Image (cartoon, rainbow, N blue to C red):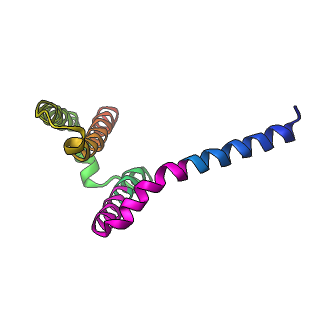
Amino acid sequence: MTVERLARLGILIALLTLGLVVVSLFAGLQQLVNNPIAAIISIILGTIMVWLMAKVALTAERRNTSWTRSITGPNGKWLFLILIVLWMAGMTLLATLGLGALQVGAIALIMLFVGFFLFMGFIWAVIGE
């Protein structure tokens, strides 16, 4: 096979994958259009998450600020350790409630993101010393 044939095959596979993703998301998007309040709330939450992640990602380009010095200092790792232990207790409580996936899914997703930021903050505090 030549490189051109492989490139065409790659484009074909990418288009087929895009088609599968669009078809699989169609029912979810239809439900979102049928519930405008849920659509607005999800857009707002998505905007807040993107803003927060961009703010955290761009922190390294700015000069040190007071809040970064306070959490990357010698006591910052202890703050994040306490927050991680509290997060683990919250996740344990959530798991022991015995709720179904529909009742606990949104809370678990939010807790997943919270845990990610806590662990990244802990690593940042330890490396920042």
Return the residue found at the far right: 2
Which of 126/35 is in front? 35
The location of residue 58, given as percent across then percent down, is 42, 54
The location of residue 107, given as percent across then percent down, is 21, 45
What range of the chain is rendered magenta? 21-49
Quarter of the rendering occupied by the N terminus: top right
**In screen coordinates, is 64 left or right of 19?**
left
Q: Which residue is at a point 28% across and 40% down the rendered structure image?
A: 112
User: Majority secondary structure of the magenta segment?
Assistant: helix
Q: Which residue is at a point 30% across and 44% down the rendered structure image?
A: 113
Quadrant in which residue 103 is drawn: top left
**In screen coordinates, is 38 left or right of 8?**
left
The location of residue 12, given as percent across then percent down, is 73, 45
Which of 73/48 is in front? 48
Q: How many marks?
A: 0
Quarter of the rendering occupied by the C terminus: top left
In the rendered image of this protein, does residue 121 appear above or below residue 33? above
Question: Is residue 30 found inside the magenta-colored segment of the image?
Answer: yes
Q: Which residue is at a point 57% across and 46% down the rendered structure image?
A: 20
Q: Which residue is at a point 40% across and 55% down the rendered structure image?
A: 28
